[in-house]
Image (spheres, rainbow, N blue to C red):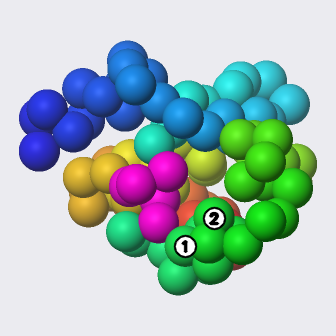
Amino acid sequence: MEDIEYHFAEGTHSDLKLPTKSETFHIHKAIFCARSPVFRKIFATDMKEKIQECVDIPDLEADTLRRMLLYMYINTMENSQWEIILKLYAA
């Protein structure tokens, strides 16, 4: 898990961008597709996100997206406060 978390933190060999208003996350399609049937379908078709290698999720704050990605990468949630959990649930 530490190796996978390292690749998330460093963005090494990433092949997809997730921009927010304040930060852009460099992630790995393989992880996203393994953990999300929605993203698996996006990248199995010729949707614009597959072609542009960028998925816009404009209504998510950078902190919420980072927490969601961390969960997707290493199945861990940090600082599980109620407001944070509600934002993650919506994401």
Query: Would you place residue 19 above or below residue 76 in this image?
Result: above
Which quadrant would residue 2 be assigned to in this image?
top left
In the picture, which quadrant includes the N terminus? top left
Graded by Cα atoms within 10 Å as few (under 14), some (14 to 19) or many (20 or more), the crowding at tag 2 reads some
Q: Residue at x 38, y 47 (%)?
A: 70
Residue 31 part of the magenta-drawn span: yes
Q: Amino acid at mark 1?
A: Arg
Is residue 89 in sight in this rendering? no
Residue 51 part of the magenta-drawn span: no
Q: Residue at x 60, y 31 (%)?
A: 25
Task: Assign a secondary structure to mark 1.
Answer: helix
- Magenta: main secondary structure equals helix
* Magenta range: 29-33
Left or right: residue 64 versus residue 22 is left
Which disc number belongs to residue 40? 1
Graded by Cα atoms within 10 Å as few (under 14), some (14 to 19) or many (20 or more), the crowding at tag 1 reads some
Residue 12 position within the rendered picture, expressed as x and y whole percent measured from the top left: 38, 20
Is residue 34 in sight in this rendering? yes
* Camera-side residue of 27 and 65: 27
Q: Residue at x 79, y 24 (%)?
A: 22
Furthest residue in direction front, as rendered: 46
Query: Would you place residue 89 above or below residue 84 in this image?
Result: below
Left or right: residue 56 versus residue 7 is right
Which residue is disc 2 drawn over? 43
User: Contact, CB < 8 Å: mark 1 with mark 2?
Assistant: yes
Residue 38 position within the rendered picture, expressed as x and y whole percent measured from the top left: 62, 78
Task: Assign a secondary structure to mark 2.
Answer: helix
Query: Would you place residue 27 above or below residue 46 in this image?
Result: above
* Camera-side residue of 61 and 73: 73
Which quadrant would residue 71 be assigned to in this image?
bottom left
Q: Amino acid at mark 2?
A: Phe
